[in-house]
């Protein structure tokens, strides 16, 4: 059962699979969280390596296995899952947009897929999309995910990794991904997904004056390699899949895959229904016509 991909088009088809898997999974996770390091297969390293368990944020006493289980090359559980999902597309050529640069996932995708990678970052401050800027003494292309500089129908794959929850207008970002994908092209991304929420919760919004309105206190910030920390605007639930369908994607699924032997596990929160984020990638295929 481990490493199987379980696709769900909605919560009704997800819940029974999750309920069957969660008990054995919790036992493994409860053991893992007590370890400093375990040996495991890493897709990006291509061999068995030491995985550092407690390398991400913590939830009370529990290390986030999803942001931890970090391999010597720096990929964590969710980056490892994204890498695996992109490789499983089996594309022999094509273009891939990744909305991060100079990251362990970026180098793994460059090295381990035949895809032509287009890497970018986003920094605030009115830098136009497509412009090259210096971040930490390295040149990086700026791209605003809601208005990129990429042409229509340009990419075979679009990938992002815990970015969408930081975008106030996430519908615009999904439509933009649809615009830059070729017909039949694939969008794959991770977000902190709240499996107990039918409707996403908006934590904050951005007013026409450009000022943040906080709807739920306290504000939630996530660590960011470029900007230090970024505000979270959304806690996504199952209506996110509807948003993808509205944005022109025809096959839309949450694809869950636990694989403890390859360092792919959940957020490992004991209050499972209240915040556990099982290892998953949101998948959307752009309609062919
Ligand atoms: Zn690795």
Image (cartoon, helix red, strand yellow):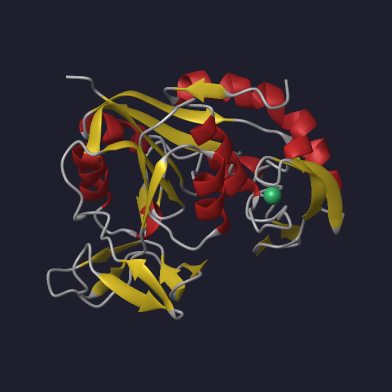
Decide if residue 191 is on the left or right side of residue 151: right
Residue 286, quarter of picture: top left
Residue 89 visible to an observer of this rendering:
yes
Is 149 in front, or is 188? 149
In this image, 263 relative to 160: left or right?
A: right
Asked if residue 208 lies left or right of residue 204, the reply is left
Q: How many marks?
A: 0
The residue at 62%/27% (across/down) is 18
x and y percentages locating residue 122 in the rendered image: 33, 66
Q: Position of residue 135 (x, y in %)?
A: 41, 77
Return the residue found at the far bottom: 137
Nearest to the observer: residue 13 or residue 43: 43
Image height of 69 relative to 88, above or below: below
Give the residue at x 38% y 72%.
139
Question: Can you say which quadrant of the picture contains the C terminus?
Answer: top left
Task: List x then y, in percent, for residue 287.
Answer: 24, 23
**Residue 218 seen in the current view:** no
Q: Position of residue 183 (x, y in %)?
A: 23, 26
Q: Residue at x 46, y 53 (%)?
A: 162
Residue displayed at 68% across by 42% down: 265
Determine whether 34 is above or below 181 in the image: below
| Quadrant location, the N terminus | top right
């Amino acid at each position: 059962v481990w490493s199987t991909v379980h696709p769900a088009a909605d919560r009704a088809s997800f819940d029974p699979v999750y309920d069957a898997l969660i008990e054995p999974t919790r036992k493994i996770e409860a053991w893992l969280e007590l370890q400093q390091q375990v040996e495991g297969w890493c897709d990006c390293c291509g061999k068995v390596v030491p995985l550092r368990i407690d390398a991400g944020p913590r939830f009370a006493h529990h290390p986030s296995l999803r942001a931890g289980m970090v391999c010597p090359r720096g990929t964590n559980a969710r980056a490892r899952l994204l890498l695996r999902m992109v490789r499983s597309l089996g594309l022999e050529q094509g273009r891939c947009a990744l909305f991060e640069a100079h990251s362990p996932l970026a180098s793994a995708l460059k090295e381990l897929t035949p895809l032509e990678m287009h890497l970018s970052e986003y920094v605030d401050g009115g830098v136009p999309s497509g412009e090259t800027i210096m971040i930490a003494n390295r040149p990086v292309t700026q791209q605003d995910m809601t208005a990129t500089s990429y042409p229509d129908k340009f990419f075979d794959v679009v990938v992002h990794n815990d970015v969408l929850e930081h975008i106030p207008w996430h519908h615009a970002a999904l439509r933009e991904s649809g615009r830059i994908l070729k017909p039949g092209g694939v969008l794959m991304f991770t977000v902190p997904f709240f499996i107990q929420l039918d409707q996403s919760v908006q934590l904050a919004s951005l007013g026409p004056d450009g000022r943040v309105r906080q709807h739920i206190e306290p504000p939630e910030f996530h660590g960011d390699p470029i900007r230090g920390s970024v505000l979270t605007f959304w806690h996504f639930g199952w209506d996110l899949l509807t948003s993808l369908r509205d944005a022109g994607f025809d096959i839309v699924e949450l694809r869950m895959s636990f694989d403890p032997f390859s360092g792919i596990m959940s957020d490992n929160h004991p209050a499972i229904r209240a915040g556990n984020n099982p290892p998953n990638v949101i998948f959307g295929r752009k309609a062919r016509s």
